[in-house]
Every structure is written in C-alpha cells, then in structure tokens.
Image (cartoon, grey):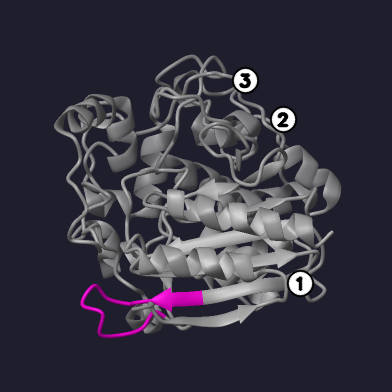
Amino acid sequence: MNAPVQGFVATGWEGVKEAFQANLDSGADLGAGVSAFHHGKCVVDLTGGWFDKDKKTEYTSDALQLVFSTTKGITAIAVAMLVQRGVIDYGAPVAQYWPEFAQHGKQDATVAQLLSHQCGLSTVVGKISLQEALDWNTITSRLAATAPSWPIGTKHGYHALTYGWLAGELIRRVDGRSPGRFVAEEIAGPLGVEMFIGLPEQYEPRVSRLSNEPVDPNTPPIDPMVAKMLADLMGPDSPGGRALSLNGAFGEITSTDGVFNTRAVHAAEIPAANGITNARSLATIYAATLGPINGVQLINDSIRECATATITPAGEADECLIMPTTFGMGFMTHGQFTPYAGSGSYGHSGAGGSVAFAQESRQLSLAYVMNQMAANLATDARAQRLTDAAVKCADAAK
C-alpha cells in the first residue's frame, strides 16, 4: 500500500516525487516533507506519510517539524545579513562586539573562527542543568567564561549546541534583537514562511513528534561491534558526546521521549538545534540566498561567496565528530561528510536526517524534513536519494 503523498511537482521533476514516495513506501520514512527551488521557482513541494507513529493522522503541509542542526544554517544566514549591513565583520574579534567573550585568552578569536567551530567551545566546563541551558543569559555567560579546549585556530570541532548561543549572542549584541526574533522579522516575515527559533505556543499542536522507533518492524538491530565503536567515539564521555548533550543536560538527542519533544525546549531559543519549520520554508530561505524570491534576496552574491567558502583545513579531522568536516561561516560546505549536490553546495544537516542547502552553479535549493530519526548526523540516505534525484532533474532542465 502506497503511503499518502500530497503537493506539487513541476514537469520534469517527477523523479524527486518517485524518490520521496519510495522512501515512504519502504518504511524508511514515517512522515516527511521535501521541497526544491530551481532558478528562483518552486519545482517540488511535497509532504507525505504520517504525522504520528500510530498512523492516525496524515503528514500534510500543515505539519511543522523540529530540524535539529539544520537550524544552524538559518543562523548563519542571519549573521551573513548583518555582515552585509556592515555591523559585523567576519575578520573582527568576537570580543569587539561581546567584550565578556575575551576571558581565558579568547580576546583575539575572530568571528570567522567562532562560526567555523575553531574556538574550542563545544561545551561548557562543569555541570549545567537543562533549565540553566535554556536561560539565554546563563548559557551565554557560561560560554564567555569557558576556556577553549584547544588553542583557537589550530583545530576545529563541532559545536553541536553551543554554536547557536555563540552566534546568537553575536546577533543580539549588534542588533539588539534575539536571534529568534531577528529570524522571524528579517527572514521568515519578509519571505512569508514559517521558521521558528522559539516556537509560539499556539503552533505547538502542529509539531510532529520525533520518533526513533523503526517504521519497519523487520529492521535488523545494529551490530554489537558497531554499537560499541559508536559508543567509544560518541559516548557520553567523549568530546562528541559532551558536545551533543552539553555535558548531559540535553540527554540523548535521538530519544523518542527526549527533551527535544518537550514544550520547554520548543519555546526556548537554541539557534543551533531547535528550529521548527517545514521543507517549503527552508527551501525558500535558501533560494533567497541565491536570488530574489518574491522580491526578497537575503544576501548578495559577494557576501554569499565569502560566507560559503570552506575555511577549515582540507582533510582536518573534526575533534568532536572524528572524521573530516568542512565549514564556512556557519555553513557546512560540500565535503565527504556533507556531499549535498556536489561542489559549491552549502547548507546544514540535522541529527536524524533533515537537511537544507543551496548550490549556486545549478541555482538549486533543496530541503528535507522528517519525523523518523535515523542514527546519523549527516549524509542521510533518504535525503541523499532526494538530492540525487533533484540534481538529475536540474541537469536535464538546462
């Protein structure tokens, strides 16, 4: 039985719908959305499957989805907009805008180093409660008072949660608005999309809960040796585990009953991890970094080229994620960990599978959101099938 699918596909882009339907029908997806823009026009806008694991409600265009680190790309766009306005300089010291940040030898750390995960602030020192982490002034003060885990600029390591508060405080210091409010008023509002960092309570019933239970009951369990390897590399006491959980404050992010399904976390501003949105909105935002969408272009070509150039050293292993990762000014760029549509792609992936990115050479943007968590932080097989199909359609449309 085919899973229900609704939405729009332009002529020549049917391959994306076929890949989307296959993800759902195979049991790889429970409920999901995919959207793509090509040369400034929406060519794919689909939702399908089920809003809940009991399959009582269909997943439609009304659904909203928490997208974990896919949020980081939106925060990176917000910072780029402020660079374009001349109030932030990527090459300037962070402390120029946030004086308290200069503690523990961080006085020369640049905005570029902060955004590219080179500042050694992937977590705070010592214990921190979830309540403290959700309080903006508390968490940003703790980060300002944290000593770097390595000499700044000598390594990079994924700031899974802290990136958002670090970049977000930069936004707040120069603009006066919180990052959630800035995104609402300067990105979502002008483009007419739904992108929330700090979800108003009236939207809560539309949020589809994340699930990490296999849709297919015949899915084989993970190999014990692989499970041990993952625990050694990303366990709670590893650099990656501490970064992903903020020393345990957020628990296991992929847990069905975890904190990311709670109202308290949805309501807070966590600009690295708690964006709530849909695929159409994400694809629209990224399309507006390539050119005007309904008269709105978020960043110009020169700022985009600067912000999306890879600045982490080629082949350098990530101190938290172990394998090499590639970062620009807050964006994950094309590389082994994040292939996207190929060279020149920039965007961000989210834990469990979501992704949003753009590629200037093809004038393509694509976003995928889902409620079925996979055991990955990037390079989700479902998302890559959709990306590969979109690339094929874009190339055929030339």
Q: Residues within 10 Å of mark 1 (few under 14, many from 20)?
A: some
First of labels 3, 1 by sequence position: 1
Q: Is residue 327 left or right of residue 51?
A: right
- Rendering coords of residue 229 (x, y %): 23, 26
Q: Residue furthest front?
A: 1
Q: Are dots 1 and 2 in contact, CB under 8 Å?
A: no
Kindly state the secondary structure of the residue where label 1 is placed.
strand
The residue type indicated by label 1 comes to Lys
Above or below residue 305? Residue 107 is: above
Element type where label 3 sits in the image:
loop
**Residue 136 vs residue 319, the one in the foreground:** 319
Dot 3 or dot 2: first in sequence order is: 2
The Cα–Cα distance between marks 3 and 2, rounded to whole angstroms, is: 20 Å
Q: Earlier in the sequence, mark 1 or mark 2?
A: 1
Split into 4 quadrants, where in the image is the C terminus? Answer: bottom right
Residue 303 on the magenta span: no
Q: CA distance from mark 1 to mark 2?
A: 34 Å
For the question of whether residue 281 can be seen, the reply is yes
- The disc placed on residue 41 is 1
Find disc 2 in the rendering and name its residue: 91
Q: Which residues are magenta?
A: 47-59
Write down the quadrant of residue 154 in the picture: top right
Alpha carbon separation for disc pair 3 and 1: 34 Å
Q: Is residue 302 left or right of residue 327?
A: right
Identify residue type, mark 2.
Gly
Residue denoted by label 3: 314
Q: Can you tell which mark lies on residue 248?
A: none
Disc 2 secondary structure class? loop
